[in-house]
Image (cartoon, rainbow, N blue to C red):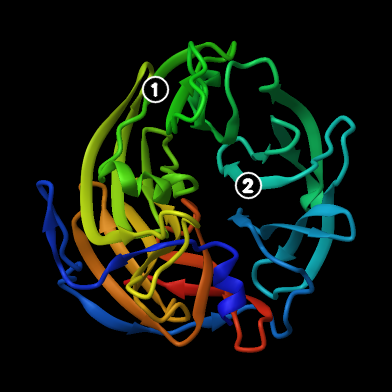
Amino acid sequence: MRYILSTIIGAAFLLSSCKDAGISYAPPVFPVTEQLETRWISKEGMLMIYPLDMCVDENYIYVLADVDKKMVQVYNKRTGEYVRGAVSKGQGPGEVITGCVLSCDADSGLFSIHDEVGRKLLRFQVGDSAKLTFVGQRDFNLLNGVVRRSWPLQDGRVLVDGQVDEVRELGVQKRFQLLSGENELIAKYNDFPVEEREKGAFWSPFVSVSPDKTKMVSCILYGGVLETFDLTPNSIRPRATRHFYRPKLDEKTVQATDETVFGFSTVCSSNDKIYTVLIGDKDLSRYNNISVFDWDGNERARYETDCNVLRLCYSEKEPDKLYGIAVSEEEEYYLVSFDIP
């Protein structure tokens, strides 16, 4: 079980609240704490090494995972039946070398995959029987700086987690950038809500963009810090920051220490709420919850689940339901859903 989360978690925070350099840390207090029943969609474990991301539409669940050189695995969302593998692994047109983000637009039926190694954002149109047809891509190879991940926004704009800037600065960690439809740098946000020595916790945060593409949330596994932002046509504006657990990083290895309290392990969002799994414990395997916040960072509810939740996704078509991927003690993956009160 520790192997599964160790692939996505690096460092952590001190459990007790503390105060240093003007930053106060305190564990979240949820006004509602309830038990949530899990609906098991798939009866058998999904055959894949590791699911990186997921999306859902009216009929299918799409999982970003490399299986037999296909990068997207499609399942019937009501029965869990496997439908097809889509998007070939490779370097040709419409192919992906290393996919790390899967996003979809419910209105247009367009799916996007960020290829980290290929340095591009590929777009696909979903058709009958969940067939994905390649319709174009954004190439980031000529940009001044690395693009680690990207998410499509409105009017051709793209949100980037990367190092894109007017001038390259070796050894300087950057955060988020906003690109125009022509890959011009519109805006950037490079502030960190922690001390200098703790910035390593922010190399690969969990990020979710709201369905209306006007907001973004970032939360870290390497400690319990949650940030929300407003995305305007020409800016990335900080909205709220919550400090729950301080990062405690080994300065040499940038790994967890004996004092580690693990933070967030996945996130998705609606236009009103943010849905996370918040471990909040030194025990790495305690990801059996769904912790809900609003876009101002306020705690709304914490739901204890009877399964370990590895991934979550939200669909505007079903506003009172979440879909997810659960992992068993035998390290098998199952499709699940939750009815959210």
- The local secondary structure at tag 1 comes to strand
Q: Is residue 325 visible?
A: no
Counting residues from the N terminus, which is met first, the one under dot 2 or under dot 1? 2
Disc number placed over residue 97 in the picture, else none: none
Type of the residue with mark 1: Lys
- Few, some or many C-alpha atoms within 10 Å of disc 1 (few <14, some 14-19, many ≥20)? many
Q: Is residue 29 above or below residue 122?
A: below
Disc number placed over residue 188 in the picture, else none: 1
Quadrant of the drawing holding the N terminus: bottom right
Residue 162 at x, y = what percent? 52, 32
Type of the residue with mark 2: Leu
Residue 84 at x, y = what percent? 84, 60
- The local secondary structure at tag 2 comes to strand
- Which is more toward the observer, 235 or 116? 116
The residue at 81%/37% (across/down) is 133
Residue 76 appears in which quarter of the rendering?
bottom right
Residue 213 appears in which quarter of the rendering?
top left
Residue 120 at x, y = what percent? 70, 29
Which mark is nearer the camera, 2 or 1? 1
Residue 298 appears in which quarter of the rendering?
bottom left
Residue sitting farthest toward the front: 252
Residue 336 at x, y = what percent? 57, 75
Using residue 332 as the reference point, say whether residue 82 is left or right of it. right
Q: Is residue 240 above or below residue 81?
A: above
The residue at 75%/33% (across/down) is 118
* Residue topped by disc 2: 102
Using residue 64 as the reference point, say whether residue 286 is left or right of it. left
Q: Is residue 62 above or below residue 323?
A: above
